[in-house]
Amino acid sequence: MGSFKGSLCLFFLFSALFISTTARAKGERKERWVHWDRANGQKRWVDRARDPAQALRLLLTYLEQAPTGRRLLAKAHKKARRLGKTLTDFVEGGKRSLTDITLVRHFHPKDWNRFEPRVRFQVRIDRELTMLEAALDLAHELTHFIEREVFNPYSLKFSARQFMAHTIEGKGGEVEAYIAECMVLDELAGSKEAIQAKCPKIRLPNGRYSPSKAAQLFYRVGQSYDTVKAALGFLGVSEKSVPLISPRHPAFISSAHEAPYPLAALSEYVSIMEKACRNDRRRLGLMEKKMREGPNPGEENLAEDLRRFKRSYFLRCSKADLFQLRDILGDRVVKGRALVYTAFRL
Ligand SMILES: [Zn+2]
């Protein structure tokens, strides 16, 4: 898959009462591995119906034929309802398959500690795919949509090691999404076709799929081995705590950074932190301006809030650290998609 060339967007969310900041995690796609369906002259899934809405309904109906697809869809419908919408509001065709997760924080202008976090989701399925390929991608992306934990880049606990592990092995992460695809492929196309694809590498003799074997595939980084080791070393992550990192040829490449997943995750981490910290610098600047101008009634705690926020900012956003990490990772951070979009307005 080619690299993503989408334009960077800034989301300016504004309301009379709240200041908004937005953090956004983008999805990814791994290499395509079901070629035979297209070779058989199958149409694109979007060409199966007169309009996009109907094509999407057909795709959902097709995925429903697989028991795993049915289970995923039931959970996805439930989540969509919980978010006050229907599933079709969250899924659409796109240039590639991905799941967008956007964290929005609405700050109260008079109380810097008060904010309302909201999460928005968007799933896109590559329009160029055949119905079967699209169903596999939908199973993959719905796994992210349903289960993926929403990270908080403003927390002291948010670390590169945690983010990498979470991206690959976490709930709703790549391993789970890959296994969901394999199960749907078995159920929709039969195991003969699955054997022609890559799923057998993670298949156990009892027919189940092994999360640990899948994780091994995702941690294969090939020529990026030294880069990943240097980045982890810089971050103070011991090699022992990431035992699966391997110099074997990568099984999967994340299209977000055109890199194996561990390297892509580290690059994402830098992008996220750079943007979260930029956002925090603006927040800090606004708080300092308020202090100089004199706090308004109801802002008596501003000095203490500012002291506390500064401490947290310097602990999380040591500029030199991020610059050095960016150096180690090379131009991938620049080439990759920006993952956190921030906006800050009064
Ligand atoms: Zn994924």
Image (cartoon, rainbow, N blue to C red):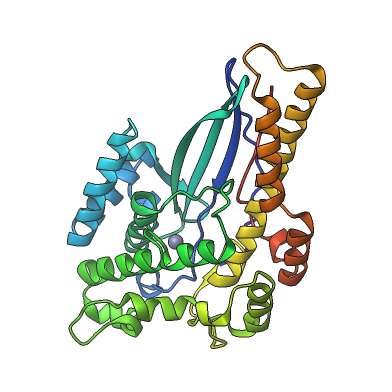
Which residue is located at x 78 percent, y 29 percent?
A: 288
**Residue at left offset 44%, top offset 80%:** 217
The answer to whether residue 66 shows anywhere in this view is no
Which of the 4 image quadrants contains residue 82? top left
Residue 291 in the figure: left or right of residue 215: right
Nearer to me, 262 or 284? 284
**Residue 146 at what x, y percent from top left?**
33, 50
**Residue 338: horizontal and vertical position, in percent?**
65, 51
Where the N terminus falls, by quadrant?
bottom right
Residue occupying the point 42% across, 60% down: 129
User: Residue reaching furthest right?
Assistant: 292
The relative height of residue 213 versus residue 43 in the rendered view (above or below) is below
Q: Position of residue 105 (x, y in %)?
A: 55, 34
Front residue of 108/271: it is 108
- How many numbered marks are there? 0
Horizontal side of residue 251 vs 275, given as left or right:
left
Q: Is residue 37 above or below residue 28?
A: below
Q: Quadrant of the C terminus?
A: top right
Position of residue 341 measured from the top left corner of the image (x, y, whole percent): 63, 42
User: Does residue 327 appear in this view?
Assistant: yes
In the orientation shown, which residue stands out farthest toward the top?
297
Identify the image quadrant of residue 270: bottom right
Side of 282 relative to 192 (left or right): right
The image quadrant that residue 195 belongs to is bottom left
Whether residue 197 sits left or right of residue 312 in the image: it is left
Work out whether 126 lies above or below 115. Answer: below
Quick check: which quadrant has ligand 1?
A: bottom left
